[in-house]
Image: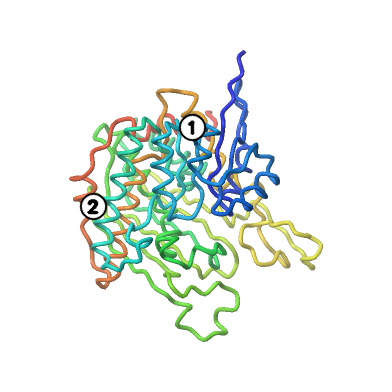
């Protein structure tokens, strides 16, 4: 069997870059495929050099374009600060990179880097116009965009897709209500509290996570029914700064945001009048919280991804755990906790990168979370800030979804390629 080497580029050396590298080492075995970490780039060359040495990456580069020209990657993992997502995607597409893995959210308002101010409605329109340019560049370059929403790649979400496929044989399969949460005590990334680099706070960077599977499962429902993806059409939201306005003592166990929201709530109405509600916040004193729940016309499925009581640990003295992180963002392992072994897998990262590799190896395969996911996610997020600024009323986004950009079949998910997680009786 001939061996094919896939060259992987890492754009970013922070937390996302670190888990991306770790994920490739955990991927399921694929016959005839060799993974080569070919290059890394950072905002500072010395950071890229240190990262390359730590992770045995072939070369560190001073610029993204230089890395593309020299390394010629098969997969470019854009896992840097949000403000670079758009420019890097355009560069990767122009270079003909087969698969572009773009971390969330897809882009930020283009006015931020220019130092402009504008109302939320203007920011929405200009952001969607900019995302149009980015996605058009990806199409023109012939690249496949994998929008890296790891919640879409949870095993539990794969399980729900399997159930939706089976339920159709009995005339069932309608997703009625979805609810999700992503929270912890505040990102430590320096760019997070700077809108010109992050694009927003908890609503933009945390509520986007459970929003992903909520959008995806409605896409899958419609595709299975033969009518096409079911799209979001109205959004109501609240984005707030809570800790900033509390006594200083209240922020002892959190990162207190000064410039972005630390709480976000979004209600999404789909074109079939079903609902999804998602929350993101920086107020979880006990570490990360990743939860998702789906009510259908035949079942209820609850995902408690992290924490999960599958494993329980009691430590009278945290010192005996050394520097082990038993659960992401857990401030101390002392006392009783619920460890999450192989967090990269349970959080969907391994399934996500496996999808990226398969999309390189198979010409007719496209990402489960792709351009459509990136587009609808951005429309919902930007309209959410518009809704919040107007007091929380509903904002119509049909101009961008059901009446807006048209997506090719290759830009849609294929639920039959989602993957199996259940055994058969």
Residue 400 placement (x, y as % from top left): 23, 49
Q: Is residue 173 visible?
A: no
Q: Residue 69, image x and y in percent?
A: 50, 34
Residue at position x 56%, y 47% in the image: 62
Q: Residue furthest top?
A: 1
Residue 91 vs residue 224: left or right? right
Quarter of the figure that contains the N terminus: top right
Disc 1 residue crowd, few under 14, some 14–19, many 20+, Cα 10 Å: some
Hey, which quadrant is residue 238 in on the image?
A: bottom left
The kind of secondary structure element at disc 1 is loop
Residue in front for this viewpoint, 190 or 362: 190
Residue at 40% x, 36% y is 93
Instruction: Looking at the picture, tell me which residue is in the foreground, 153 or 52.
Output: 52
Is 360 above or below relative to 16? above
* Mark 2 neighbour density, 10 Å: few (under 14) some (14–19) many (20 or more): many
Q: Which badge, 1 or 2, comes first in the chain's sequence?
A: 2
User: Residue reaching furthest right?
Assistant: 320
According to the image, label 2 marks what residue? 233
Is residue 265 in view from this perspective? yes
**Dot in front, 1 or 2:** 2
Question: Horizontal placement of 230 versus 29: left or right?
Answer: left
- Which mark, residue 419? 1
Q: Give the tally of numbered discs.
A: 2
Quarter of the image holding residue 306? bottom right
Q: Residue 271: image x %, image y %?
A: 22, 48
Residue drawn at (55%, 72%), measured in percent from left and top? 255
């Amino acid at each position: 069997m001939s061996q094919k080497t896939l060259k992987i580029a890492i754009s970013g050396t922070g937390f996302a870059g670190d888990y991306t590298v770790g994920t490739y080492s955990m991927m399921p075995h694929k016959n005839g495929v060799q993974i080569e970490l070919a290059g890394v780039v950072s905002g500072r060359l010395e950071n890229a050099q240190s990262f390359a040495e730590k992770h045995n990456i072939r070369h560190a580069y001073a610029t993204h374009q230089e890395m593309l020209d020299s390394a010629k990657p098969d997969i470019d993992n854009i896992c840097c600060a949000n403000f670079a997502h758009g420019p890097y995607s355009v560069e990767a597409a122009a270079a003909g990179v087969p698969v572009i893995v773009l971390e969330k959210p897809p882009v930020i308002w283009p006015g931020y880097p220019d130092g402009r101010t504008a109302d939320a409605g203007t920011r929405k329109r200009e952001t969607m116009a900019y995302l149009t340019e980015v996605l058009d560049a990806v199409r023109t370059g012939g690249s496949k965009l994998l929008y890296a929403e790891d919640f879409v790649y949870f095993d539990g979400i794969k399980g729900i897709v399997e159930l939706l496929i089976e339920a159709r044989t009995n005339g069932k399969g309608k997703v009625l209500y979805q609810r999700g949460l992503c929270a912890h005590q505040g990102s430590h990334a320096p760019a997070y509290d700077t809108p010109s680099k992050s694009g927003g706070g908890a609503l933009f960077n945390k509520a986007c996570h459970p929003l992903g599977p909520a959008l995806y499962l409605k896409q899958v429902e419609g595709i299975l029914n033969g009518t096409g993806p079911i799209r979001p059409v109205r959004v109501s939201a609240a984005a707030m700064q809570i800790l900033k306005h509390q006594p200083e003592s209240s922020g002892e166990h959190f990162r207190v945001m000064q410039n972005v929201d630390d709480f976000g709530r979004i209600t999404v109405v789909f074109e079939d009048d079903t609902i999804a509600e998602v929350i993101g916040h920086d107020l979880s004193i006990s570490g990360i919280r990743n939860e998702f729940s789906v009510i259908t016309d035949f079942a209820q499925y609850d995902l408690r991804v992290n924490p999960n009581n599958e494993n329980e640990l009691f430590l009278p003295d945290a010192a005996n755990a050394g520097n082990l992180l038993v659960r992401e963002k857990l401030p101390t392992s002392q006392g009783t906790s619920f460890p999450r072994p192989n967090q990269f897998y349970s959080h969907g990262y391994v399934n996500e990168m496996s999808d990226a590799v398969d999309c390189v190896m198979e010409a007719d395969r496209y990402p489960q979370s792709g351009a459509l996911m990136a587009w609808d996610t951005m429309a919902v997020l930007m309209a959410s800030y518009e809704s919040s600024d107007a007091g929380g009323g509903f904002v119509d986004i049909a101009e961008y979804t059901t009446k807006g950009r048209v997506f090719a079949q290759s830009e849609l998910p294929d639920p039959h390629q989602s993957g199996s997680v259940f055994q058969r009786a």
